[in-house]
Amino acid sequence: DSGVKRVTDADEIEQLLKKESNAFFLDVREPKEIEELGSMKGYVNIPIGELERRMKEIPKDKTIITA
């Protein structure tokens, strides 16, 4: 098991964030997409195209939840 769990429902993500007190919610969409579609409270936005160069901003000691 790689420890990866696929979650596709916003309600399921919300429940996971409540359950995981040590979670980091990473939204990899472009800011325009978030503006149009919205996101959830507490997200950190690092667009997928910037992810590789911004990896240091992602904590290594937390559960990462991505959208």
Image (tube, rainbow, N blue to C red):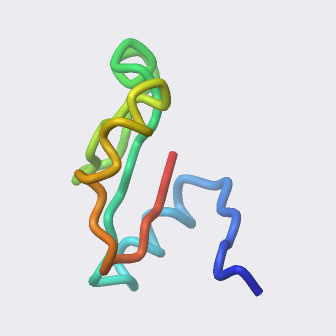
Q: Residue furthest right?
A: 1
Image-based side of 41 in relation to 32, left or right: left
Number of residue marks? 0
**Horizontal arrangement in the rendering, residue 16 relative to residue 7 (left or right):** left
Given residues 36 and 67, the one toward you in this image is: 67
At a point 34% along the width and 49% down the height, the residue shown is 55
Residue 38, given in percent of the width and then of the height, sits at: 38, 30
Instruction: Locate residue 27 relative to residue 57 in the image: left or right.
Output: right
Q: Percent from the top left, x then y, of residue 67?
A: 51, 45
Q: Residue furthest front?
A: 53
| 59 relative to 15 in the view: left or right | left
User: Which residue is pictured at 45% across the width and 37% down the height?
Assistant: 28
Where residue 17 sits in the image (x, y, percent)? 38, 71
Which quadrant, please, contains the N terminus?
bottom right
Query: Compared to 40, does 61 lie above or below?
Result: below
The residue shown at (53%, 61%) is 11
Q: Quadrant of residue 21?
A: bottom left
Of 24 and 36, the residue lying toward us: 24
Say which quarter of the image contains residue 39.
top left
The structure residue drawn at horizontal position 46% and vertical position 62%, both measured from the top left corner, is: 65
